[in-house]
Image (spheres, rainbow, N blue to C red):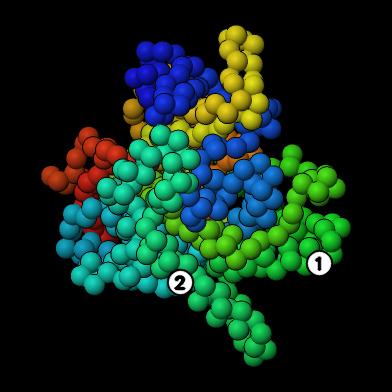
């Protein structure tokens, strides 16, 4: 994409199969299309994923169905909800710590991509599936891990799927060919269904009612209950959802993440207007719950794992940055490493994360589809209705006009005193506008919790096995650099 951008400029076209796709990497145009004219570019695409769990996910939903689900989902990712889920992530980090400690005592070299993948898998199992599993045991991997690996592995199935998708999604619909095999889907469906049934019986049991779970699955189950109540009231108002949203959405004092990455709750979606126009049907079905947990796995596993592995890799290569981060952690915490509010107020940690997401952006682009003909006067181009548009974040994040020495790791770019020098709309690792990444706060909470704990206890360093040029794996939809081999030792 960077080569194409250098050759053809900020707006050019290519093909996905036989279908033309426009690529855009002009910051002002990206802003215009994703914020001002969002209503034209509300959908990602018109792919029909053969009615599987991916098809039912927020990521793939269209227009009003999406607005409905997004307005219900985004409050489950509020700062308040992050605070309540934080202890679950801390437990997962403790399990990672138990795995790392013996290796640190021996000053071993470890492969970070796999190790951080074990952490993010543990977090997803605990938060989205309400299940505790051992993700670190290579000898006897749990069925959950084996099934999840099948979702992410590059297989003949995934290659055939992509080829069929590029030939038009009608083919997928006719053949019923799926991205994930039926056995994998059935496994996750049954896992969730049995947990939901258990929780339902606990809810009905007075003695167990106080044992309220605080994971993501419970939040989405609670959201389902709320929408059911609103439906019973004939959708007269959405007050209970909205007021919960308002009381919860406020950011913790000193948290700069919305300023850097954008907000996840879009006030421009006027729910009352949608309800009045009967465009919003506020309800969540059991399939929505299944799909949202599955989506958590698909969207949150590799992305957050990659962020963590590459951040620790950069710290291992740059001792000065690691020392500065360690100092900030020591000053911020007084031996208490499980305080959520404190991890949101660490400028250098925030800057290290932001720079990792710039240099190694997990998703190189995000896409939208034009819902009507759309003319860009400034360049005299009309995008026809139904055309796919990809916003090329990769080229923007590596453009020397916006980021001098773009291939160098330099967290200082994102320190508060330097941030105002950044050109607006040149930083968007979580996408842009009302359809940006809804799981952003969760990913940041998870990454910050892990990094604070790890850097406080361990020092990471370069070993003879550490590669200075990481190789990107082929046939992957997201950035996949490996092996990320680095050394680990206990701090004095
Ligand atoms: C470092 C970690 C992550 C990165 C870099 C990332 C990045 C992105 C990007 C670029 C998009 C497309 C946004 C757009 O089209 O404007 C997206 C969408 C999405 N992400 Fe993430 N993501 C991460 C973690 C997560 C996690 C942990 C979840 C957990 C649920 C998640 C759930 C989603 C969902 C549901 C969407 C679709 C939102 C919608 O269509 O309304 N992501 N993500």
Q: Badges 1 and 2: C-beta atoms under 8 Å apart? A: no
Label located before the other in sequence (1 or 2): 2
Q: Nearer the viewer, residue 276 or 36?
A: 276
Please tell me which residue is depicted at 34% across the width and 19% down the height of the picture. Answer: 3
Residue 182 sits in quarter: bottom left
Image coords of residue 165 (percent x, y): 42, 39
Residue 168 in view in this figure:
yes
Which residue, given by chain and number where applicable, does mark 1 sit on? 232
**Can you say whether 63 is above or below 302 in the image?**
above
Q: Which mark is residue 259?
A: none
Which residue, given by chain and number where applicable, does mark 2 sit on? 191
Please tell me which residue is depicted at 74% across the width and 39% down the height of the picture. Answer: 268
Q: Is residue 45 left or right of residue 244?
A: left
Please tell me which residue is depicted at 26% across the width and 40% down the height of the picture. Answer: 473
Label 2: few (<14), some or many (≥20) within 10 Å?
A: some
Q: Nearer the viewer, residue 255 or 396?
A: 396
Q: Is residue 367 left or right of residue 149?
A: right
Image coords of residue 197 (percent x, y): 56, 78
């Amino acid at each position: 994409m960077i080569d194409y951008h250098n050759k053809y400029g900020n707006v050019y076209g290519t093909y996905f199969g036989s279908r033309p796709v426009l690529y855009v990497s002009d910051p002002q145009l990206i802003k215009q299309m994703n914020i001002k004219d969002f209503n034209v570019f509300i959908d990602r695409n018109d792919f029909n994923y053969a009615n599987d769990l991916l098809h039912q996910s927020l990521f793939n939903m269209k227009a009003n169905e999406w607005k409905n689900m997004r307005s219900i989902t985004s409050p489950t990712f509020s700062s308040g909800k992050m605070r309540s889920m934080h202890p679950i992530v801390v437990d997962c980090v403790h399990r990672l710590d138990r795995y790392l400690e013996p290796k640190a005592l021996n000053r071993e070299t470890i492969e970070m991509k796999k190790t951080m993948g074990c952490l993010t898998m543990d977090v997803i199992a605990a938060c989205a599936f309400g299940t505790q599993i051992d993700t670190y045991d290579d000898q006897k991997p749990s069925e959950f891990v084996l099934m999840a690996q099948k979702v992410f592995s590059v297989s003949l199935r995934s290659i055939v799927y992509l080829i069929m998708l590029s030939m038009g999604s009608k083919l997928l619909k006719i053949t019923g060919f799926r991205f994930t095999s039926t056995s994998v889907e059935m496994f996750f469906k049954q896992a969730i269904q049995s947990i939901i049934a258990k929780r339902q019986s606990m809810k009905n049991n007075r003695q167990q009612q106080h044992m309220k779970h605080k994971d993501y699955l419970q939040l989405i189950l609670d959201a389902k209950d709320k929408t059911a109540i609103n439906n019973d009231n004939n959708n007269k108002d959405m007050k209970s959802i909205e007021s919960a949203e308002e009381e919860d959405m406020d950011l913790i004092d000193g948290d700069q993440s919305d300023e850097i990455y954008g907000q996840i709750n879009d006030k421009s979606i006027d729910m009352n207007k949608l309800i009045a126009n009967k465009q919003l049907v506020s309800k969540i079905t059991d399939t929505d719950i299944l799909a949202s947990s599955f989506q958590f796995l698909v969207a949150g596993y590799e992305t957050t794992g990659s962020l963590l592995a590459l951040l620790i890799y950069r710290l291992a290569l740059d001792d000065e940055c690691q020392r500065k981060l360690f100092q900030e952690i020591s000053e911020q915490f007084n031996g208490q490493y499980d305080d959520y509010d404190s991890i949101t107020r660490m400028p250098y940690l925030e800057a290290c994360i932001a720079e990792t997401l710039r240099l190694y952006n997990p998703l190189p682009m995000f896409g939208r589809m034009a819902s009507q003909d759309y003319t860009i006067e400034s360049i005299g181009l009309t995008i026809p209705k139904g055309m796919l548009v990809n916003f090329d974040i990769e080229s923007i994040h590596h453009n020397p006009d916006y980021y001098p020495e773009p291939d160098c790791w330099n967290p200082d770019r994102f320190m508060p005193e330097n941030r105002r020098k950044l050109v607006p709309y040149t930083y968007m690792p979580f996408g842009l506008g009302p359809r940006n990444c809804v799981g952003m706060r969760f990913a940041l909470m998870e990454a910050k919790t892990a990094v604070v704990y790890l850097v406080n206890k361990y020092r990471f360093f370069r070993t003879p096995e550490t590669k200075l040029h990481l190789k990107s794996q082929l046939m992957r939809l997201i950035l996949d650099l490996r092996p990320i081999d680095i050394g680990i030792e206990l701090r004095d």
